[in-house]
Image: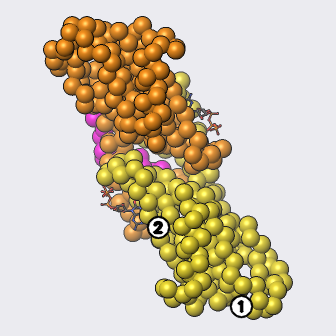
Chain colours: A orange, B yellow
Amino acid sequence: MIDIEKVASSVSDLLLALGVERDSHTYDTPRRVAEAWAECLAGYDNDPVIHLDATFTGPSDPGLVVLSGIRLTSTCAHHLLPITGTATVAYRPRPGAPIVGLSKLARVLHGYARRLQVQEHIGYQVVEAIRQKLDPVGAACIITAEHGCISTRGVLERGVLTTTQATGGEWEPGHADLQAILAEHAARSV
Amino acid sequence: MIDIEKVASSVSDLLLALGVERDSHTYDTPRRVAEAWAECLAGYDNDPVIHLDATFTGPSDPGLVVLSGIRLTSTCAHHLLPITGTATVAYRPRPGAPIVGLSKLARVLHGYARRLQVQEHIGYQVVEAIRQKLDPVGAACIITAEHGCISTRGVLERGVLTTTQATGGEWEPGHADLQAILAEHAARSV
Ligand SMILES: Nc1nc2c([nH]c(=O)n2[C@@H]2O[C@H](COP(=O)(O)OP(=O)(O)OP(=O)(O)O)[C@@H](O)[C@H]2O)c(=O)[nH]1
Ligand SMILES: Nc1nc2c([nH]c(=O)n2[C@@H]2O[C@H](COP(=O)(O)OP(=O)(O)OP(=O)(O)O)[C@@H](O)[C@H]2O)c(=O)[nH]1
């Protein structure tokens, strides 16, 4: 949990160091920024794996489960700028194994995304959480995102997208499940 | 000019207040963020109207001049989050009046955009600068942008665009010049 007062006061100091004039627009900026930080870092409030604690009985062969088109918002650990994109989370439960509520796959992703992050880590952590809790045949998290640190500063490349693949379990590159997941991801990412 | 050391030290305090762990990714974050701020607020380094000081002799009737598709990057004064979009800057010099280098119209825009801003202000300030320096028949600045404070926090509306029109001189809503400018803007904004 973030101490809003302390964050707001350090944002006041930052505005001072930036030499920014305080007027009607910036008067309330420390409070707004502190609240924005609380929202953007809400993923630290608990361990995202808890979302996979509640399971249901699955059919004898649940098959491949792919949640695509998840709108992802995260924050770059290197520059504190937004990362925005689309994610796909998928797993293939073992025959007879329990399944999880579909929204929980998105909740795990948001739990890791709502932290200071590096894109590769988000996918890795999502796959690890699914592996640890559900021990599936395979798990994957594909993310396509635009990084503020590339589009709004530095190289200033607008529209440049980074796609990362994190996979676990028995899925090797080229596996049919993975190809199906990548096709879904490509069709849904914006 | 921003004091990079002072900004970096206030970003260190901010990370502390946010309770963020310092690891290989965040070790250098205060320096990176301070440099990013210097870049994003570089518009304070000088008065953007100076870009319109150098003029050339124009033809007896220069006609309407429209610079469209300018990639705009600014920072929200309310939440310190990126504003990204496309801008059109236009003016109609009076017959016989001097004209300015085309890139200077974009430089004026970037000069105001690279500050803590509110979208309406950027357009208003660009139009005022052109009016003050060139006294044209008309001047306009149309901006279509996505705001981080709308897309990455709060209402979390991705893809929502705000279009603002700033006009000056003899151009009233519905004027033929303005209609031509708006058509160019609509065709070029992304
Ligand atoms: N692998 C990876 N790299 C990232 C992520 N986010 C992020 O900022 N980076 C990269 O981290 C690097 C930080 O490098 P740096 O310490 O030289 O920082 P800088 O701001 O001076 O670099 P730059 O101006 O090239 O962006 C940059 O290349 C930046 O693009 C991410 O999610 N994954
Ligand atoms: N007119 C205008 N409004 C803006 C700009 N940038 C910007 O943040 N705003 C708005 O400023 C307002 C600040 O309101 P607020 O003090 O209630 O801040 P908040 O973060 O609690 O509001 P929110 O959660 O509705 O975004 C928000 O409605 C936000 O969308 C801009 O460039 N022009």
Q: Is residue A149 magenta?
A: no
Image location (x, y in percent) of residue B40: 58, 53
Question: Residue A73 occupies which quadrant of the picture?
Answer: top left
Q: Is mark 1 within 8 Å of ligand 2?
A: no
Within 10 angstroms of label 1, few (less than 14), some, or many (20 or more) residues?
A: some
- Choose between A15 and B139: the one closer to the eye: B139
List the residue tagged with mark 1.
B94
**Left or right: A69 with respect to B11?**
left
Q: Residue at x 36, y 52 (%)?
A: B157
Answer yes or no: is residue B41 visible: no
The image position of residue A57, as x and y in percent, is 15, 14
Q: Which mark is residue B163?
A: 2
Tell me the residue at 40%/50% (across/down): B158
Tag 1–tag 2 contact (CB < 8 Å) = no
Q: Is mark 2 within 8 Å of ligand 2?
A: no
Subunit of mark 1?
Answer: B
Q: Which residues are magenta?
A: A1-14
Disc 2: which chain?
Answer: B
**Residue A32 location, x and y as percent?**
35, 54
Q: As rendered, which of A39 and A17 lies closer to the eye?
A: A39
Residue A6 is a magenta residue = yes
Is B76 or B162 nearer to us in this picture? B162
At label 2, the amino acid type is Thr
Report whether B188 appears left or right of A49. right
User: Element under label 2?
Assistant: strand
Image point 75% across, 92% down: which residue? B95
